[in-house]
Image (cartoon, grey):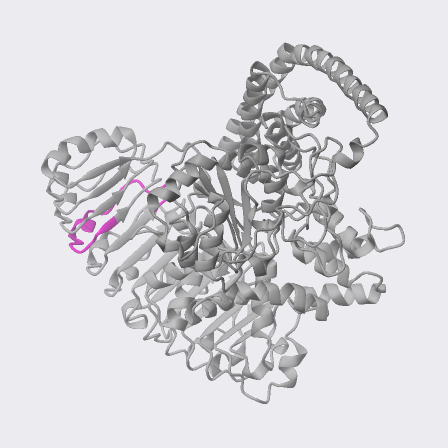
């Protein structure tokens, strides 16, 4: 297993090093040298991996050491590839570490490789001699016993009858007669029966003959879809895309401890979960470990739980039960399991937590493998999330479905094929279905299919029935509100991260949710693999005082296509969500044809390039509550139909260009009296005139990657009257901000102020203490800030203070102890702080401080006076990640 992982890690490492060589100047020499070393090492490791020989313990430990170093090198390469070019400190540190790894690998090759080669030569000689002896004996036996071939076909029973060896109708019938466990038609050359009938599959499945060794990695990639076959297709062996996951799950299953008897395989619909589970059950090591006591059952969406539990117990114990499952004495269950030995129960296609709880057997030696689209963290602690196919494997699988060969035929447009494959995003089921639907079709049909996939539309009836409707089953059992939240995700552009703050706020405004309820829906969708949380968002955003600003979510394109498909079932004028599926240079023709009729949409999402006044046409949106404007432009004329949105509550402007956008037609803000939330990203905010429109209901403003100095410098606007109900203000990555205008201190309604990653911000207004309603203050990753204003101590209602990564902050106000409501302080990476104010011992409400080790020692004295104080030492992190966009 160590050689297998070493080979996989080395292959992945080479790919990452190529990215570093192309994109990171300071790391390039070290990356090139390390790549040369790994290139020379990889063929040797691959040869050891594919040999099938079980290595002695000392050689396994050497390979394990190598695998650990390669994993570390892979982590370094990924960090280097993600590091921006101007982050000199980080690049130099990573380059030095890569040089150290390269030197270690060179020494390892010189020291260990000659010994490995000599040992392998000896193994080959011994193995060849043993194989020749077996062949000679088999020939002699065949010549002397003409009935041997007939005798070899007698059925052999392996322990109890496996669960899946029975037809489903008999499984549900507790009085059905016991049948032969396997359909014995073929035998292996060794005389053992094949596994036909072991799985609920109509076609035979072949098992490797070498019963004590892991299977070879030589299965073709195109055969990864065992268990997801279309009608009329035969069962095919598994491809290399599953191998790593297979080894990880095997390791969890064969772990001897009973503390974690439940193991899970999770992933989105069509990702090959059942395929992986079946391959694990057919694996010789697993069969040997569980002595063929493996019981595979598919639950689907409406299982008969009582019959299922009863039948499972009959299979595990080998005894027929007359009566109900709950009548079996507990001592009899435990005794029966001990007598029979280890068992593996595979529960495939689990949909409900309550159903899973009913089917969990708490028996010693009984392992349960749960296969589901959903994650069940309360029960399943050891999990493997199935990975989608890489570019090469995806293309090979697609070509097998579309052309019945492993590569693109010479006569076919390879670029067009790759564009279609790219739309499948590595999902095996999509590759199979779309590839099969395009087989023998002319080029125009392929181009049409690519365009329809880009718009999130079904390309044919087969695509709709076999892929989209199958994936739609993932959302059928969601509650009405959670389902609507899932469908909202389709409103954001393809292949873009969705800011968590935007998503949570949009759900709160649209569905009348509290923030805690919106976050709970986010976690539920994540557990059901319907979205992906980035940067450990669930843990980082779960704290009471956490900020969502730097967190985001992503969604697989096919799940987005599903949301678009469901949304687009209605005519454009009556849809709840009116969405441009991809970026266009102009608005959709369908919208223009229907512009004379009002649109009923609650969410309007427009994705364009640069827009001028003449590019818009008037539309009427009397019910619109959310408007998302995504664009890539230096100049952007705001749509005139904003004035037809009297109910608009959330306005989101995101510029995906390389520089900030100048907005035109800002007068359309005048009628937006119900606007509650405004998100501006990469926008050059214009100067605020004295006659600025009053936005009486605006509660939340987020300015991300914006240019603000022109709008703030010398501003005389009375923000307290312009924004009388503003409660949340976020300024993030606005690098031109050097100081905040004092007029911000007049916003008495402000409860939360977040200023982050503004590395030129050198001071805060001296009138800061006037923000009497402020409860949360974040001023983090502002390295030019040297002090906090003394007036901050007058904030009697402040509960949370975040000054982390303020590297040049030299002291805290001496009267800090007067902030009697303060509950939590985050002051990690404030390296210039050497003392704490004496008054800090008066912070009786303080319960949690996060800081570095040196500052933690300073808080020890205050701990005696603050009985409930918990000082947490943060992990050291010497990097410049706060400068990343």
Q: Position of residue 498 (x, y in %)?
A: 50, 58
Q: Position of residue 701 (x, y in %)?
A: 38, 64
Q: Position of residue 458 (x, y in %)?
A: 68, 69
What residue is at 31 percent from the left and 70 percent from the top?
723
What residue is at 30 percent from the left and 32 percent from the top?
852
Viewer can see residue 84: no
Residue 621 lies left or right of residue 166; in this view the side is: left
Nearer the observer, 478 or 671: 478
Above or below residue 833? Residue 775 is below
Residue 394 lies left or right of residue 726; in this view the side is: right
Q: Is residue 791 magenta?
A: yes
Check the picture and name the quadrant holding the N terminus: top right
- Magenta region, mostly helix, strand or loop? loop
What residue is at 62 percent from the left and 86 percent from the top?
594
- Magenta part of the protein: which range? 780-800
Nearer the observer, 653 or 635: 653
Above or below residue 444? Residue 863 is above
Nearer the observer, 254 or 37: 254
Above or below residue 306? Residue 577 is below
Nearer the observer, 334 or 737: 334
Viewer can see residue 476: yes
Q: Is residue 300 magenta?
A: no
Q: Position of residue 45 (x, y in %)?
A: 67, 24
Residue 110 lies left or right of residue 770; in this view the side is: right
């Amino acid at each position: 297993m160590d050689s297998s992982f070493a080979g996989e890690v080395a292959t992945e490492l080479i790919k990452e090093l190529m990215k570093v060589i192309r994109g990171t100047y300071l790391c390039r020499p070290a990356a090139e040298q390390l790549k040369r070393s790994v290139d020379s090492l990889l063929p040797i490791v691959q040869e050891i991996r594919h040999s099938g020989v079980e290595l002695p313990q000392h050689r396994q430990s050497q390979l394990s050491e190598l695998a650990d170093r390669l994993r570390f090198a892979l982590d370094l390469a990924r960090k280097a590839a993600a590091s921006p070019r101007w982050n000199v400190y980080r690049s130099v540190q990573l380059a030095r570490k890569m040089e150290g790894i390269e030197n270690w690998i060179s020494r390892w090759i010189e020291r260990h490789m000659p010994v490995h080669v000599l040992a392998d030569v000896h193994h080959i000689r011994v193995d060849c001699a043993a194989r020749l002896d077996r062949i000679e004996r088999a020939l002699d036996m065949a010549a002397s016993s003409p009935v041997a071939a007939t005798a070899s076909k007698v059925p052999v029973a392996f322990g109890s009858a496996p669960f899946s060896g029975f037809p489903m109708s008999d499984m549900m019938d507790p009085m059905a007669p016991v049948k032969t466990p396997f359909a014995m038609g073929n035998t292996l050359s060794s005389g053992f029966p094949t596994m036909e009938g072991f799985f609920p599959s109509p076609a035979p499945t072949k098992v490797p003959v070498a019963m004590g060794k892991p299977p070879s990695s030589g299965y073709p990639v195109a055969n990864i879809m065992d268990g997801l076959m279309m009608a009329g297709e035969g069962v095919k062996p598994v491809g290399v895309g599953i191998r790593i996951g297979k080894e990880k799950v095997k390791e969890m299953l064969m772990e001897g401890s009973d503390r974690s008897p439940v193991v899970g395989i999770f992933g989105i619909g069509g990702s090959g979960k059942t395929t992986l589970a079946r391959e694990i059950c057919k694996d010789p090591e697993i069969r040997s470990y569980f002595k063929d006591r493996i019981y595979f059952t598919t639950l689907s969406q409406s299982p008969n739980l009582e019959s299922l539990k009863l039948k499972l117990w009959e299979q595990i114990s080998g005894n027929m039960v007359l009566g109900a499952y709950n009548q079996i004495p507990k001592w009899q269950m435990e005794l029966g399991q001990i007598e029979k030995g280890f068992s593996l129960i595979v529960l495939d296609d689990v949909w409900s937590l309550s159903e899973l709880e009913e089917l969990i057997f708490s028996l010693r030696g009984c392992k349960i493998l749960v296969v589901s689209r959903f994650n069940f963290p309360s029960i399943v602690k050891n999990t493997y999330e199935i990975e989608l196919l890489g570019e090469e494997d995806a293309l090979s699988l697609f070509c097998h479905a579309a052309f019945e060969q492993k590569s693109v035929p010479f006569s076919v447009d390879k670029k067009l094929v790759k564009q279609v494959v790219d739309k499948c995003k590595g999902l095996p089921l999509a590759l199979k279905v779309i590839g099969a639907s395009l087989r023998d079709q002319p080029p125009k049909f392929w181009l049409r299919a690519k365009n329809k996939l880009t718009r999130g539309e079904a390309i044919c009836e087969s695509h709709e029935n076999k892929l989209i409707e199958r994936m739609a089953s993932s959302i059928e059992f969601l509650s009405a509100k959670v389902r609507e939240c899932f469908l909202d995700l389709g409103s954001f552009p393809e292949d873009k991260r969705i800011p968590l703050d935007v998503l949570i706020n949009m759900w709160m405004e649209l569905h009348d949710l509290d923030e805690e309820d919106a976050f709970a829906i986010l976690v539920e969708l994540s557990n059901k693999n319907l979205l992906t949380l980035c940067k450990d968002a669930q843990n980082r955003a779960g704290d009471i005082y956490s900020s969502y600003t730097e967190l985001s979510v992503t969604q697989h394109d096919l799940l987005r296509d599903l949301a678009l498909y469901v949304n687009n079932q209605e005519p454009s004028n009556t849809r709840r969500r009116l969405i441009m599926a991809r970026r266009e240079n102009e608005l959709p023709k369908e919208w223009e044809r229907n512009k004379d009729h009002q649109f009923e949409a609650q969410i309007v999402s427009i994705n364009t390039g640069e827009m001028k006044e003449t590019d818009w046409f008037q539309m009427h949106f009397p019910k619109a509550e959310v408007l998302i404007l995504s664009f890539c432009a230096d100049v952007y004329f705001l749509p005139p139909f904003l004035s037809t949105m009297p109910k608009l509550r959330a306005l989101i402007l995101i510029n995906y260009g390389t520089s900030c956008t100048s907005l035109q037609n800002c007068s359309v803000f005048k009628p937006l009296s119900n606007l509650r939330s405004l998100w501006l990203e990469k926008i050059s905010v214009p100067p605020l005139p004295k006659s600025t429109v009053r936005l009486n209901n605006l509660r939340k403003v987020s300015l991300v990657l914006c240019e603000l100095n022109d709008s703030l410098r010398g501003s005389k606007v009375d923000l307290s009257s312009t924004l009388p109900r503003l409660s949340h203000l976020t300024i993030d990555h606005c690098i031109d901000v050097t100081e905040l205008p004092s007029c911000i201190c007049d916003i008495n309604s402000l409860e939360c102020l977040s200023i982050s990653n503004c590395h030129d911000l050198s001071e805060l207004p001296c009138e800061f203490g006037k923000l009497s309603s402020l409860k949360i203050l974040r001023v983090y990753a502002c390295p030019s800030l040297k002090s906090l204003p003394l007036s901050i101590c007058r904030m009697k209602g402040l509960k949370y203070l975040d000054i982390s990564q303020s590297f040049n902050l030299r002291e805290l106000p001496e009267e800090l102890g007067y902030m009697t409501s303060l509950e939590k302080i985050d002051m990690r990476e404030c390296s210039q702080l050497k003392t704490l104010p004496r008054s800090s011992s008066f912070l009786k409400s303080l319960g949690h401080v996060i800081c570095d080790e040196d500052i933690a020692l300073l808080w020890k004295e205050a701990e005696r006076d603050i009985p409930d104080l918990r000082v947490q030492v943060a992990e050291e992190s010497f990097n410049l990640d706060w400068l990343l966009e």
